[in-house]
Amino acid sequence: MEQLISIALRIDRQVLHYRTVMNLVGWTCFVVVTADYAGFIKIPPFLAIPFWFGVILNIFRWGIWEAMVQPQIQARAERDGSRDMISPDQRESR
């Protein structure tokens, strides 16, 4: 379990490091998909993301990462007392 938490911690650091870029990509995808659904633009069929792929990504994010991995990372950070394992939002509250 410690090895899994270490891997998750490295992923979490990269996600925090590129948070602005990932948010920008997410918002851009949202706008493009919404415009396609409303009929303003037409996305070519080869760019369409299958529904099942989006469902699996959401299950991974909310069911596994936020519910199981993130609490373990926070518990480890609090136990070790290291500030570099805690997200910037949590650092401000300390």
Image: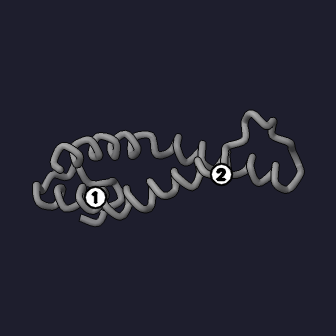
Question: Which residue type does callout 1 highlight?
Answer: Arg
Above-or-below relation of 81 to 24:
below
Considering depth in this image, is 18 or 37 the residue closer to the camera? 37
The quadrant in which residue 3 appears is top left
Taking the image as shown, residue 26 lies to the left or right of residue 82, namely right
Q: Is residue 90 above or below residue 45?
A: below
Quarter of the image that includes the C terminus: bottom left
Which residue is drawn at the image coordinates 27% and 46% (left, top)? 9
User: Residue extending furthest left?
Assistant: 80
Give above or below for 49 relative to 93: above
Relative horizontal placement of residue 57, taking residue 9 as reference (left or right): right
Q: Residue 17 bears which disc, if any?
A: none
Q: Nearer the viewer, residue 47 or 83?
A: 47
Q: Residues within 10 Å of mark 1 (few under 14, many from 20)?
A: few
Residue ranking furthest to the front: 52
* Residue 39 pos. (x, y %): 89, 52
Relative image position of residue 36 (x, y in whole percent): 82, 49
Which residue, given by chain and number where applicable, does mark 2 sit on? Answer: 51
Quarter of the image holding residue 13? top left
Q: Nearer the viewer, mark 1 or mark 2?
A: 2
Say which label, 1 or 2, has the lower sequence index: 2
For badge 2, the amino acid type reads Phe
- Decide if residue 93 is on the left or right side of residue 20: left
Q: Which residue in the protein does label 1 denote?
A: 91
Where is residue 73 drawn, in percent x and y? 24, 55
SS at mark 2? helix
Question: Nearest the camera: 1 or 91?
Answer: 1
Look at the numbered discs 1 and 2 and tell me whether their residues touch, using CB distance below 8 Å: no
x and y, in percent, of residue 10 in the image: 29, 40
- Does residue 4 appear to the left or right of 79 in the view shown? right
Secondary structure type for disc 1: helix
